[in-house]
Image (spheres, rainbow, N blue to C red):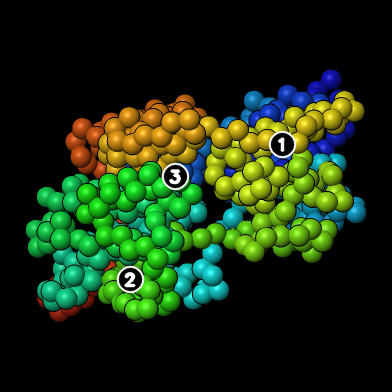
Amino acid sequence: MSVNQQSSHRVVIIGGGFGGLYAAKALGKAPVQVTLVDKRNFHLFQPLLYQVATGSVSPADISSPLRGILSPYKNITVLLDEAVALDPQAQQVVLQSQTIPYDTLVVATGVSHHYFGNEQWRNLAPGLKTVEDALEMRRRIFMAFEAAEKEADPERQKAWLTFVIVGGGPTGVELAGAIAELAYSILKHDFRNIDTRATRILLLEGMDRVLPPYAEELSANAQQALADLGVEILTKAMVTKIESDRVTYRLGDRTEEVTAKTLLWAAGVKASSMGEILHQCTGVERDRVGRVIVEPDLSIPGYPNILVIGDLAHFAHQDDKPLPGVAPVAMQEGDYVAKLIKKRLKGETLPPFHYTDYGSLAVIGTHAAVVDLGFIRFTGFLAWFIWVFAHIYFLIEFDNKLVVMIQWAWKYFTRKSGARLITGEESLLRVKVDEQGEYYTPETNENQLKV
């Protein structure tokens, strides 16, 4: 008899990110029927998304098909769909195409960009949460250099070679460092009419230091490493206005303005729409960015069979502050809820969830990173090597580990980056084909190109 025939307990997992995927894999041989629902057919290794945005790796290098990952587990079904509603009384999840029942529901849908009430900035300053976001950033970054190469006016050329990154957390720091390496090292011999080393990279952070969650000495080291790369850092800088070619920010009592054609957002997140759906149908409380406030066992009050994990969960039962929205938290929460479900099936209990913090890492550039392992903190080459090892280790599939390792080794020894394709919206991708001024727009399918 198959596992599905033996099993009666139905577990529905919404979201195939770190939390959802780790929960599913941990339930892969349990006596339950698991349905994993995601609107994407792949798991994305988000910590390396900034490397897609800056042309170091291709999207496929950090993505793995969910069906391929979970195919060894015959009790798991994967559905390409999106949850749009929930009926907790009937224990049903309403998808776009069908309604499915559950005995235990695990919600792991993560977060999206937060523009603090200024949604009009979304198209002017893209964030970095999805493959599409990364490809749009990559298009804007490399198109800026291409546009500057063709620009005869010095002021407009300067605007094209100015990059403003809003937000000095890990994503902003990593983006700033990667763009600096691009401009000052990788691309410096590739253009004829511009010197990419004249690029200006401005990092704006509203707090008093970059990497606010890290220890002060690590933040100071990261800031110095960025400055050594050529990045300008402004702390206590609050953005007040974003336009297509300029950013206005408040610095103390002064209001400043910088002209720049490329604006990138790394300043904040808000909960996915499932946070609102859960609030509407269960009355669960949420924090100021919409994350669901969960119980010590990651369930929501009054509904012990609804578990919320990952970035969507506001878990404040440890050290009196919410756990950070990072991959290790989601991984451990995914493992925990799988153990909790298996214990409940046996009529047993499990102690409350406890996150074990093995440390924090952030990379600034080659040989430059910061590592906080709790009992020791360090920077420099050793920190960078640990960052490389950790990210290779946690990539989901072996072929991804191998490809990314080879790509990084190639970049390290040659100072070249191979995934510098410009795709997507191409308002600037016009190529003059004759003296009368006729233009055509090339349409390129990235999947047909060998990187």
State the residue position of label 3. 215
Q: Looking at the picture, which amino acid does disc 2 mark?
A: Ser
SS category of the residue bearing label 1: loop
Marks 2 and 3, Cα distance to the nearest angstrom? 43 Å
Q: Looking at the picture, which amino acid does disc 1 mark?
A: Phe
Q: Is residue 178 visible?
A: no
Circle number at residue 353: 1
**Residue at (22, 49) in percent of width and height:** 228
Q: Looking at the picture, which amino acid does disc 3 mark?
A: Ala
Mark 2 or mark 1: name the one nearer the start of the chain.
Answer: 1
Mark 2 or 1, which is nearer the eye? 1
Mark 3 or mark 1: name the one nearer the start of the chain.
Answer: 3
Question: Can you say whether 448 is above or below 388 in the image?
Answer: below
Mark 2 or mark 3: name the one nearer the start of the chain.
Answer: 3
Residue extending farthest to the top is 1
Marks 3 and 1, Cα distance to the nearest angstrom? 25 Å
Question: Can you say whether 49 is above or below 141 in the image?
Answer: above
Circle number at residue 199: none
